Image: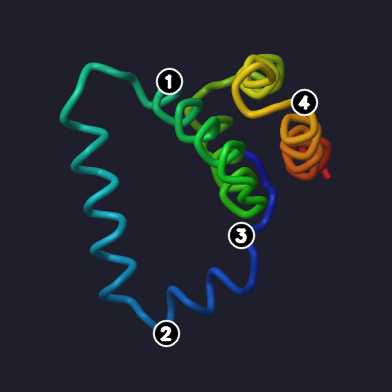
Amino acid sequence: MTDTPVPTRFTELKQRYPKLFEAIEALGQAVRSEGPLDEKTTQLVQLGAACALRSEGAVHSHVRRALAAGATPDEIYHAIVVLASTIGFPNVVAALTWADDVLLRQGD
């Protein structure tokens, strides 16, 4: 797993609303375990959705999670680039920038 820190705001919210976060995490675990996709594929799919939503925080999170699940930086970049015809090139460039926030910090 990468050493990229979880944002402070996320940690604060998780501490303030522990039951909410437990429920969200349980839902995520339940949907991941209900089908045939492995964890790496699931994280790459969720990364694509985060890119489409233009959610910088979710892109950061799913890049970290994809790395932890065994995805390579090249797989992560490719998962984003293939979205160009679906979400548009400017959105892809933004998502690549957000992915770099995590990928370029590896080993810091």
Question: Does residue 37 sit above or below 15 in this rendering?
Answer: above
Q: Which mark is residue 41?
A: 1
Mark 4–mark 2 distance (CA, rounded to whole Å): 38 Å
Q: What's the CA distance linking mark 1 and mark 4?
A: 23 Å
Label 3 vs 2, first from the N-terminus: 3
Classify mark 4: residues with Cα within 10 Å, few (<14), some (14-19) or many (20+): some
**Residue 16, which numbered label?**
2
Report helix, strand or loop for mark 2: helix
Quadrant in which residue 89 is drawn: top right
The alpha-carbon separation of the residues under discs 2 and 1 comes to: 31 Å
The kind of residue tagged 1 is Thr
Which circle, 1 or 4, is nearer the viewer?
A: 4
Q: Mark 1 packing: few (<14 Cα in 10 Å), some, or many (20+)?
A: some
Q: Earlier in the sequence, mark 4 or mark 3?
A: 3
Alpha carbon separation for disc pair 4 and 3: 28 Å
- Mark sitting earlier along the chain (3/1): 3
28 over 20 or under it: above or below:
above
Q: Amino acid at mark 2?
A: Arg
For image coordinates 23% across by 17% down, the residue present is: 36
Q: Nearer the viewer, residue 56 or 21?
A: 56
Query: Would residue 80 appear left or right of 49 to someone viewing this image?
Result: right
Rate crowding at label 2 as few (under 14), some (14 to 19) or many (20 or more) other CA atoms within 10 Å.
Answer: few
Identify residue for label 4. 89
Where residue 91 sits, quadrant-wise, is top right
As helix, strand or loop, the secondary structure at mark 4 comes to: helix
